[in-house]
């Protein structure tokens, strides 16, 4: 739920809008400001701000400009008794412009639309953060750079000095040492043979000579790698079970 602020120098108007917002969204956390200076002094700010334009001191339009200069990404809804500022509102990317007196239904409509806008922006930002946090490889093959996420890889093998990445939707070949790839991919991949690296999540079963993956690929297990693989696989299983709790 976004945080919501209201700035109006008229106390009665301030409390009236606050009451209507809480009636529409009872769980909303509200911040009330009596002047533009109070808004600018608040370092944390709010996600949505209902902002009166005509106020003594720093008026609402100036507050909006300074917020935008600070790259504040608040959703701004202007509230005013005059409609002459509507074009200036576009300059500061205002979400809406309410002219007093406005009916409660109009306030409700604008409020819910602003919340929806915030939710869409929030989900986009979250997706970006998740995407940027994901480990990724940049594979250069045939003059083209391709981004590959480790979770797309079933296993990797070396053949004719090239690494072949076996993925669900096809294979990629490029020049790379398997030892370098092993270091890049980390503990969720196991070196089971001098020529093979498998993703532990894809392991269906194994024995001292073979690892069978979920796509039924059978990867040879080197005798000297078996004990280390078993320990790494058990550590992996314990780790994901711990995350699950």
Image (cartoon, rainbow, N blue to C red):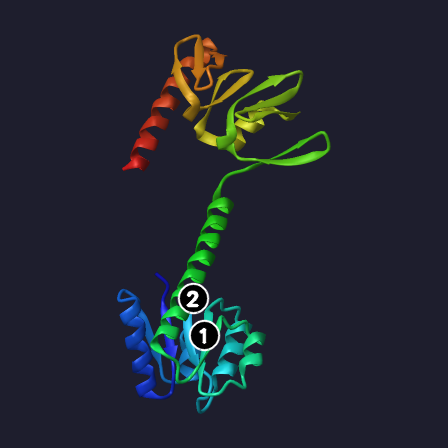
Identify the disc placed on residue 85: none
Image point (30%, 31%), residue name = 241
Which quarter shows the C terminus?
Answer: top left
**Closest to the observer, 160 or 153:** 153
**Residue visible at 44% across and 87% down?**
81
Q: Position of residue 9 (x, y in %)?
A: 38, 87
- 101 or 161: nearer the eye? 101
Give the x, y percent position of residue 168: 52, 25
Q: Residue under label 2, please give it.
A: 114
The answer to whether the residues at label 1 and label 2 have Cβ atoms under 8 Å apart is yes
Label 1, secondary structure: give it.
strand
Mark 2, residues whose alpha carbon is within 10 Å: few (<14), some, or many (≥20)? many
Q: Residues within 10 Å of mark 1 (few under 14, many from 20)?
A: many
Quadrant the N terminus occupies: bottom left
Q: Position of residue 242 (x, y in %)?
A: 30, 34
Q: Nearer the viewer, residue 80 or 132?
A: 80
Q: Which residue is mark 1?
A: 77
């Amino acid at each position: 739920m976004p945080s919501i602020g209201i700035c109006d120098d008229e106390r009665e108007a301030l409390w009236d809008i606050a009451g209507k917002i809480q009636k529409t969204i009872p769980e909303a956390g509200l911040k009330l400001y009596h002047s533009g200076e109070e808004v600018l002094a608040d370092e944390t700010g709010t996600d949505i701000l209902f902002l009166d334009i005509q106020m003594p001191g720093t008026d609402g339009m100036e507050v909006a400009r300074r917020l935008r200069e600070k790259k504040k990404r608040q959703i701004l809804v202007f509230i005013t008794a005059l409609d002459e500022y509507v074009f200036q509102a576009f300059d500061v990317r205002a979400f809406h412009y309410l002219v007093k007196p406005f009916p409660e239904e109009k306030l409700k409509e604008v409020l819910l639309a602003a919340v929806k806008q915030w939710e869409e922006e929030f989900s986009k930002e979250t997706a970006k953060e998740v995407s940027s946090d994901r480990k990724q490889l940049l594979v250069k093959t045939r003059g083209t750079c391709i981004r590959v996420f480790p979770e797309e890889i079933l296993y990797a093998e070396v053949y004719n000095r090239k690494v072949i990445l076996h993925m669900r939707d096809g294979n990629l070949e490029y020049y790379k040492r398997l030892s370098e790839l092993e270091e890049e991919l980390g503990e969720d991949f196991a070196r089971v043979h001098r020529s093979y690296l498998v993703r532990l999540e894809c392991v269906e079963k194994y024995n001292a000579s073979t690892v069978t993956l979920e796509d039924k690929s059978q990867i040879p297990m080197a005798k000297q790698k078996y004990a280390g693989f078993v320990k790494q696989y058990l550590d992996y299983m314990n780790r994901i079970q711990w995350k699950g709790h």
